[in-house]
Image: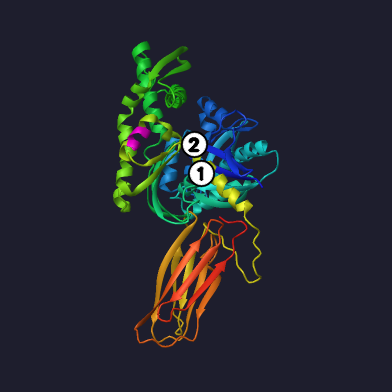
Amino acid sequence: MAAIGVHFGYTCACVAIFKDGRADVVANDAGDRVTPAVVGYRDTEQIVGIAAKQGQVRNAANTVVKVKQVLGRSFTDPETRSHAAKTKCQVVNRDEKPYYDITAGGQSQFVAPEDVAKLIFCKMKETAQSALGSDVRDAVITVPFEFAQAQKQALRDAAEAAGFHVLRLIHEPAAALLSYNLGQESSSGNSHVLVYKLGGTSLSVTVLQVSGGLYRVLHTLTDHSIGGESFTQVLAQHLASEFKRTFKHDVSGNVRAMLKLMNGADMAKHSLSSLGAANCFVDSLHDGIDFECNVSRARFELLCSSLFNKSIQPIRALVEQSGVSASSITTVVLCGGSARIPRLQHLIRDMFPDVDLLISAPPDEVIAVGAAVQAGLLVGRDAVDPEDESVTVDVSAADILLKEADESGAELFTVLLPSAPLPARRHHVLTGPGHLSSLCLEIYQRGVREQPEKLSKVVFQELQPSEEARRSVDAVVTMKRDGSVHVSCVEQVTGRSEVVTIATAAAAS
C-alpha cells in the first residue's frame, strides 16, 4: 500500500510518498524537492511553484505568497492585517473573510485563500502521483502546533478540495520525530527531545517527552518575527548597498529591483549552506545595468550575526519555561529550510555539546517524511472490525472529554485528551461522594462543527458505601498511533477496574 505525506509551509511545500516500507521525498517537474508555496495568476492559467516565484517581479499584484498565514482567519484577525500590509497582492474584505483581488485576462476576480491553497495541494498531489504512477489519494497533512481549530479545518478542506483523502492532520513536531523513528523502537524509558524548526517566516521550538512510543508536548514557543526571509532580506540590503557603492544608484526604494535582489539573495543564501562563497548575478537590475557580486560565507555570517543570536534565544527561554534542564535533553531535531545554515547548527551544537543533533536528513524535508511515515502506518494497519455498538473517533481534530454523573444528576465535563500530536496519554483523578453506590463516567468527543458526541460509558455498580468522605477513580486515557482510544479506570477504595477500547477512525484527523 502507498500513501502520501504533505508539509504545507508558509513559504514552501514538500511532498513525500510511503511505498515498500519507506518514505521518500518526491521532486517536482522542475527537479526541485521543495516547491515554493507561491501561486501566480496569469491571463489564461494559474502557475504554482518556482515559475510563479520568479514571475513575481513582473506580476507581483497577481501573485499570492504565504497564503497559509490567512487560512481559516477572519478579515479582522491581526495575522490577516499583518499579511495584507506586507503582500503586494491586494487583500479585500468580503463577508468578514479575506479575499485576494486578482486581475487576470482583463477581468477582476476575488479569490479565497482556500482556493489558493487548493492549487498548491493539487501541485503536491500531481507530484506524488507522477512518482507513484497511480491515483493514490490517502494522505497525512502537517499543521503547526499553534494552529487553532479553524485553521486546521481550512487546511483540511483545501487538501480535500484538491482530491486528497485526508487520513489525519498531525502536528509538525510529531512528524519531525516520526521521520527519525524516535521512540518507536523502544517500549520503555523516558527521553526529552527538542525540535528546532526555522522556516521561511517563523521560528518554533518545542520540547517533547518521548515515552514508549508516546509523544507528549511539554512546551512550545513560536516567533513569527524571524525566519529564513529575515536572512534573505539582510543579504539583499547588503547587495543593494554594494550596487550603490559601485554604480552610485540607490535601488533600496525600487520595489521591482528589490524583488530581483531578494531572488538573487535567496539563491546565494542556499549556496552558502554548502559552499564557502556564492556569486549573485542580477540581469538589468537598474537602468539596464547588470549587477554581479560575490559573497563569502564569512561575510554572510557577519551580516546576520544579530539574527543568529535572535534565532537561538528562544531555546534558552523554552528550556527555562518547560522545567526541563538542558542536560536532560537527549536529542535535538533540526527542521525547516533555514536550519541548513552551518553557523546556526554550530551555535546549537555549542548549547548541547553532548546531545545527538539529528541533521542527516535535509531539514526542509524532515516534516514531509514524517507525515508520509504516519500515512504509511495508517494505510498499512490491520483492518479493524468493530462491533456494531463501537464508535469511531475523529482523533486529533477533537478533544476527548469525560462526563461524570452521580445519583443527583449533577454533570461535569473534563477535557482528558486535548487535540495533540499522536500518540498521547493523559492521567486524571476523578472524585465523588463516598456514599454513592454507583458511578457513571461517559467518554465524549468535541466535534469540529457539532455538539459533544458520546463515544462510550464506564459504570461502576453495587459499590459499598465508604467511610471516606470522597471516592476517587484513576482514569488513564491513551490514544495510540493508529488512532484507537483506550480508557482504563480504577476505583481506589475497592480496587475494581474497567477498561474500554474505542475503535480507530477510518478517516482520522
Identify the residue at image location x=67%, y=45%.
136
Which numbered disc covers residue 489?
Answer: none
Cα distance between the residues tagged 1 and 2: 9 Å
Which of the 4 image quadrants contains residue 286? Answer: top left
In the image, residue 151 sits, relative to residue 412, either above or below, namely above
**Label 2 neighbour load within 10 Å: few <14, some 14-19, many 20+:** some
Asked whether residue 418 is in view, the answer is no
Q: Nearer the viewer, residue 347 or 29?
A: 347
Which secondary structure, mark 1? Answer: helix
Question: Is residue 450 located in the magenta-colored stretch of the structure?
Answer: no
Question: Residue 449: percent from the left, percent from the top?
Answer: 54, 61
Quarter assignment of residue 242: top left
Q: Name which residue lies at 44% across and 57% down.
A: 188
Circle 1 residue: 179
Q: What span is colored magenta in the figure?
A: 344-349
Q: Which residue is mark 2?
A: 361
The picture places residue 491, in percent across and down from the top left corner, at 43, 77
